[in-house]
Image (cartoon, helix red, strand yellow):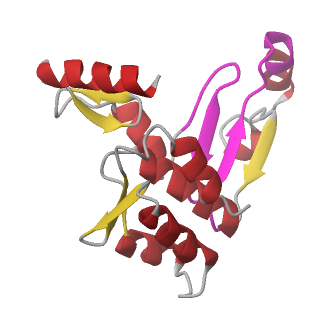
Amino acid sequence: QSKMFGQIEEHLKTGGLKRYEISNFAVPGFESKHNSMYWENKSYLGFGLGSHSYMRSIGNWGTRFWNPRHMNIYSNAISQSDNLTNLKHLPFAQIDTLNAKSALSEFFMTSLRTSRGFSVAALQERFKLEPTHEAWKQLSRLVQNKLLSLSNDQYKLTADGIPLSDQVFRDLTFI
């Protein structure tokens, strides 16, 4: 499977497409703007059955919420709401307020999915990790195992790390 994916990537490169995310390729300048909202920790709203939303400004680390998946539940919740002008009145099926550990884990997963990865400065600006934090040990081990590269204070998945990204993300999960 890894060999086949490598062949596909080479074929796409000859057509002018460049990998900008683990499983996405595009002509430079035409990358998905929708997906970049997830990777760059930006707020987004989803409307309709089962749609997901995320607000950075709610809670210290952000809040995820999603709508019911079944039409009758969704419709009943909306019809029973007196005021749909405020987020707290919308019919969410579930709300998940992130804590520091889950936000850190998501930062690694979403940042490392992209070809640009993340900078040490961005990590420190957002999380202010102590030098002894387990994340630094894990990052160092992943670099030693050649699953991540560290160049100019920028961490990225390596060619060997891309097919093993699920393992990398598990190693950088601190929930």
**Main structural element of the magenta stretch: helix, strand or loop?**
loop
The relative height of residue 47 versus residue 121 in the rendered view (above or below) is above
Q: Which residues are magenta?
A: 45-74
Left or right, 106 with reference to 13: right
Residue 166 in percent (x, y) is at 58, 42
Foreground residue among 110 and 84:
110
Can see residue 126? yes
Q: Is residue 61 above or below residue 36?
A: below
Residue at 64% across, 52% down:
170
Q: What residue is shown at x 41% (from left), y 29% (from top)?
A: 23
Residue in front for this viewpoint, 88 or 116: 116
Residue at 39 percent across and 40 percent down: it is 36
How far from the left and from the top, in percent, is residue 158? 36, 50
Rendered position, 24 above or below 130: above
Q: Residue furthest top?
A: 72
Q: Quadrant of the C terminus?
A: bottom right
Residue 146 belongs to the span the image colors magenta: no
Q: Residue at x 52, y 81 (%)?
A: 128
Image position, residue 50 (x, y; %)? 70, 23
Residue 21 image position (x, y, % from top left): 37, 37
